[in-house]
Image (tube, rainbow, N blue to C red):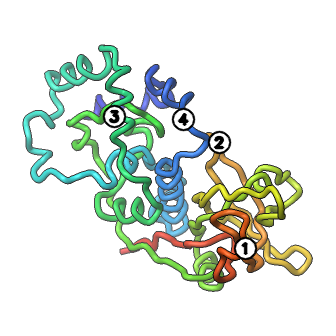
Amino acid sequence: MDGFLQTLSSSTGVCHPDCVRASNAQADYDASQSAALVAVSLISSARVLFKLDPEYTRYSAQYLVDNVGKEEVEGEMDQPHCQYTMENILRYLVENVWTRREDRLEEELDQRRHDLTVKECLEFAFKKGLPRGEHWAHLGCVSKVPPFACQIPRVPMKGEVIEATNWDEAFELFKQQPIGARLHVFSPEFYRVGEEGFYEGPSGNGTRYVGLRDVIVVEVERIEGEIVVTVQVFYKKKTSFVKVAMRSMLLPLNGVDESEVTEPTTLLVDFCIPRLSIN
């Protein structure tokens, strides 16, 4: 197994052609990949802050994409086809790497489970642990997970998910560590925010509601008396930082008809953190 892990580490960043094709065909935003990436980033940051890791350690987001919501098989690690043997490795390579997979690739993508949430990913990590990033496939990998991957060591994660129902509660959590949230995104306003400006939500006619996007709150400040939150967002296959105005407002979430809105809210909602057990 040590040799296998070394091979994985040395191949970090190397993509199979199937992965390249899938990435090129992928939409600008993948909800499951974003949720998994936010979850592992929150855990990595918290483990450094609370001195559980000596330095920032990258854990595998793809492990969560591959496994959260997957039906558990009792005694899986003891089954013969799940053992790390040369026979099983060769069988996997023949069936999944060395043969043409276009038809199966499309079929596997169609069979993806529901979009994951950050909370689901965190809860799974606390239940099963996480492998280090270099010991699992890259984020966006479409190759079938080898049966013997269940033998790859995982770092135990102990803790619970803490949620906040409003910004005041979320700010108290932020005093301890970065927090996860979801951002209401409107077009074209969100895409027009420059480095010096900040995102204020819908501006009027022509506004289109895009949906909720997972983010990490990394900074809170006051600008001209208004609370402005800097968030890290994984969008359009890159990482960006956006300043978000935290004023309460009526958001037309199902269109531009404000009659559909029942109560005011903020652009950031659904706050949560992974509260780690230190002992």
Please state if 226 lies on the left or on the right of 146 as rendered. Answer: right
Please state if 168 lies on the left or on the right of 93 as rendered. Answer: right
Residue at 53% over, 46% down = 30
Q: CA distance from mark 4 to mark 2?
A: 10 Å
Residue at 51% over, 71% down = 273
Q: Label 2: how many residues lie within 10 Å, few (<14), some (14-19) or many (20+)?
A: few
Residue 51 rendering spot, x and y as whole percentages: 49, 66
Residue at 44% over, 66% down = 119
Q: Label 4: how many residues lie within 10 Å, few (<14), some (14-19) or many (20+)?
A: few
Q: Residue under label 2, please give it.
A: 236
Q: Residue under label 3, please give it.
A: 108
Q: Residue under label 4, please give it.
A: 26
Question: Which label number is shown at residue 126?
Answer: none
The answer to the question of whether label 3 and label 4 lie on touching residues, with beta carbons closer than 8 A, is no
Nearest to N terminus: mark 1 or mark 3: 3
Label 4 vs label 2, nearer the camera: 4
Q: Secondary structure at mark 1?
A: helix
Q: Amino acid at mark 1?
A: Glu
Q: CA distance from mark 2 to mark 3?
A: 23 Å
Q: Amino acid at mark 3?
A: Glu
Q: Secondary structure at mark 4?
A: loop
Residue at 72% over, 56% down = 208
Nearest to N terminus: mark 1 or mark 2: 2
Nearest the eye: 222 or 70: 70
Question: Which label number is shown at residue 258?
Answer: 1
Residue 171 rendering spot, x and y as whole percentages: 65, 80
